[in-house]
Image (spheres, rainbow, N blue to C red):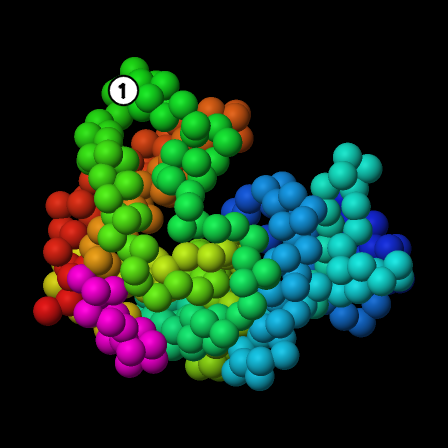
């Protein structure tokens, strides 16, 4: 019997009408449904942020990764009866169906943090050989104010934050230094990166990472950007002893797997700040477009300020 969630149409893939449908427990930037069709489970996704050409590249990247013998799964887009990896909504948006990957989100336990970091570090190492034509974006030529269409007028957005009583001083500082950080990162090793490393984008079952998810913002960038993101999202709070220990653990795993250069390691704190600022700008852009509320933006600004005060934790000794 179907739940109250409307069942998506799977006929383009030749699949029977779902017998079970539910929305994911955690938020997503796309319309996503977990469905049971016949005897199998699938993930139905309607893309809200990628153009059709970007979806093609994402699926090409996923197909390439699927042939690399990874010790974990990545989303596998099913082919429609027409031979494509996605169908089209009436309004032009792309829709895909992926096989369900079993597992749960890892916890903040040190062991599961280490397992997640090892899986993502392995992914980044393998992505170093990925062809450039599967990169959906060139992040090396994208300034912070260009990452979301709604954030182009950054001064207006900052003004609105000021009007809301949100102290965004650290954000202004990072934005003003963005060109310099991009210049300094120009000589670092570059490759296709995942772009959104996070505990929420990994699945674990019986002590094994079963899958890595969400390649929606993958693109061409310095590989250290993925390392910085991993230290920020997989590590703990940098103002606590345990959090600093977890950050060091994540760095050690990535360093051993990738053999990071000295210049990469030295720039990690600045790349962490850039990631924090990018998260605010992206959410502010969605707020400007009416897709997020001011509380979400303010929360990211406050979180960024706390990390700025302890940013030295991201500079391994």
Report the residue marked by disc 1: 162
Magenta span main SS: helix
The answer to whether 40 is drawn above or below residue 162 in the figure is below
| Left or right: 188 as drawn, with respect to 242 | right
Q: Position of residue 241 (x, y in %)?
A: 12, 63
- Residue neighbourhood size for the residue with mark 1, other residues' Cα within 10 Å, grouped as few (<14), some (14–19), many (≥20): few
Q: Position of residue 134 (x, y in %)?
A: 59, 61
**Figure quadrant of the N terminus:** bottom right
Examine the image and state in which quarter residue 89 appears. top right
- State which region is magenta: 251-266
Q: Any magenta on residue 255?
A: yes
Q: Residue at x 42, y 75 (%)?
A: 125
Q: Nearer the viewer, residue 13 or 18?
A: 13
| Left or right: 314 as drawn, with respect to 92 | left
Q: Position of residue 158 (x, y in %)?
A: 31, 23
Q: Residue at x 54, y 63 (%)?
A: 132
The answer to whether 69 is drawn above or below residue 99 in the figure is below
Q: Residue at x 38, y 40 (%)?
A: 143
Residue 68 seen in this snapshot: yes
* SS at badge 1: helix
Q: Any magenta on residue 149?
A: no
Q: Position of residue 153 (x, y in %)?
A: 40, 23
Residue 36 seen in this snapshot: no
Q: Residue at x 39, y 73 (%)?
A: 121
Examine the image and state in which quarter residue 294 appears. top left
Q: Nearer the viewer, residue 291 or 23?
A: 291
**Figure quadrant of the C terminus:** bottom left
């Amino acid at each position: 019997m179907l739940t109250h969630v409307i069942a998506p149409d799977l006929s383009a893939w030749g699949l029977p009408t779902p017998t079970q449908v539910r929305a994911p427990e955690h938020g997503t930037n796309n319309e996503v449904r977990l469905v049971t069709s016949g005897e199998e489970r699938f993930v139905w996704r309607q893309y809200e942020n990628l153009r059709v050409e970007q979806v093609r590249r994402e699926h090409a990247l996923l197909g390439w990764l699927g042939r690399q013998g990874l010790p974990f799964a990545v989303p596998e887009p099913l082919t429609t009866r027409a031979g494509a990896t996605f169908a089209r909504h009436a309004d032009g948006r792309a829709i895909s169906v992926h096989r369900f990957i079993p597992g749960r989100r890892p916890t903040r336990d040190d062991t599961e943090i280490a397992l997640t970091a090892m899986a993502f570090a392995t992914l980044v190492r393998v992505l170093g050989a990925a062809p450039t034509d599967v990169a959906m974006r060139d992040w090396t030529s994208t300034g912070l104010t260009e990452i979301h269409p709604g954030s182009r007028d950054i001064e207006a957005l900052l003004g609105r934050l000021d009007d809301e009583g949100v102290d965004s001083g650290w954000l202004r500082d990072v934005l003003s230094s963005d060109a310099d950080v991009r210049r300094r990162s120009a000589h670092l090793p570059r490759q296709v990166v995942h772009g959104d490393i996070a505990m929420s984008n990994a699945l674990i079952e019986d002590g094994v990472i079963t899958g890595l998810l969400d390649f929606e913002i993958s693109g061409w960038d310095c590989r250290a950007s993925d390392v910085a993101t991993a230290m920020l999202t997989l590590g703990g709070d940098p103002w606590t002893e345990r959090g600093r220990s977890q950050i060091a653990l994540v760095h050690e795993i990535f360093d051993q797997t990738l053999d990071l250069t000295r210049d990469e390691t030295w720039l990690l704190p600045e790349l962490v700040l850039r990631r924090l600022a990018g998260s605010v700008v992206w959410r502010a852009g969605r707020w400007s477009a009416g897709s997020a509320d001011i509380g979400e933006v303010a929360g990211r600004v406050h979180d960024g300020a706390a990390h700025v005060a302890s940013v030295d934790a991201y500079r391994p000794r």
